[in-house]
Amino acid sequence: MIRILLACLLAVTVAGCTGSQRPQADQSEIVSRSYRDPGPSTLTLYTMISTRTGSGAHTSLMISGSERVIFDPAGSFRADVVPIKDDVLYGITPNVERAYRSSHARETHYARIQTIEVTPQQAEIALQLAKQSGPVAGAFCANSTAQLLQQVPGFEQIQTTFYPVKLSDQFGQLPGVQTAEYRENDNADLQQGLAFNNARLNELEAASPQ
């Protein structure tokens, strides 16, 4: 177990799977930014993977049901237009989702994106579990996501792990999962990517009809 934790802590230093210190939104802001995708209910697992070693650096889960959120345990993402409560990101519009994946994909890491269609009931259970999870400790991103999935009917076979790629491999074995990769070759600095995409989202917000 000590070796596993040391490996996860190393990933923390590389990709930002850190303890959450993000500003906490109030309920009125969460409600005002809430977004529901018009498509079917889905769960989407994001795995950030080193382009050099193939090791996993971060895990998160987008839940699309009665609203669309990203469970981003011990994550680094933040943007002015995205309310955050504990480790749940709210208001995940298509623009925000693109900013999220773009912020993590860079010269040193790419995003593996795995999506599975679920029932509205499954999505709602996952959504409530994410909201109840509270802040997640650093290096527990894959572990907390695996534990959440285990509690969703139909996902009980997911085994707990501290390794993002091992969780991704398990998720990929589920019937109906669609897998894609998202890559960018910009600066390796995560904070620079976050700042760029925050500015871009603010521009889109200012240009949208009020």
Image (cartoon, grey):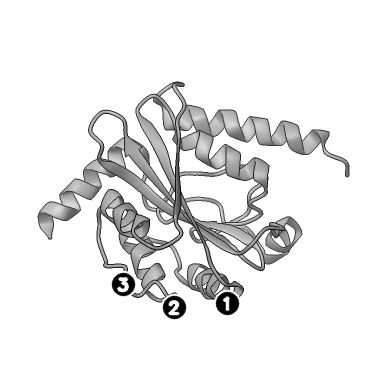
Residue 108 numbered mark, or none: none
Q: Nearer the viewer, residue 150 or 180?
A: 180
Pointers 1 and 2 in contact (C-beta within 8 Å): yes
Quadrant the N terminus occupies: bottom left
In the picture of the structure, the residue carrying the numbered disc 1 is 121
Front residue of 178/153: it is 178
- Rounded to the nearest angstrom, the CA distance separating label 1 from label 2 is 9 Å
Q: Which of the 4 quarters of the picture holds residue 30?
A: bottom right
Q: Nearer the viewer, residue 67 or 83?
A: 67
Q: Is residue 209 at all visible to an observer of this figure?
A: yes
Q: Which residue is mark 2?
A: 153
Is residue 195 shown left or right of residue 21? right
Relative placement, left or right, of 48 versus 62 is: left
- Three-letter amino acid code at disc 3? Gln
Q: CA distance from mark 3 to mark 1?
A: 18 Å
Which residue is most to the right?
Answer: 210
Query: What's the residue at 11%, 52% (across, down)?
Result: 3
Q: Residue at x 38, y 51 (%)?
A: 59
Q: Quadrant of residue 84?
A: bottom right
In the rendered view, would you say 72 is above or below 81?
below
What is the CA distance from the residue labelled 2 to the residue labelled 3?
A: 10 Å
State the residue position of label 3.
157
Dot 2, crowdedness within 10 Å: few (<14), some or many (≥20)?
A: few
- Seen in the picture, residue 83 relative to 188 is either above or below; the reply is below
Q: List x then y, in percent, for residue 79.
A: 60, 42
N-terminal of the pair, mark 1 or mark 2, is 1
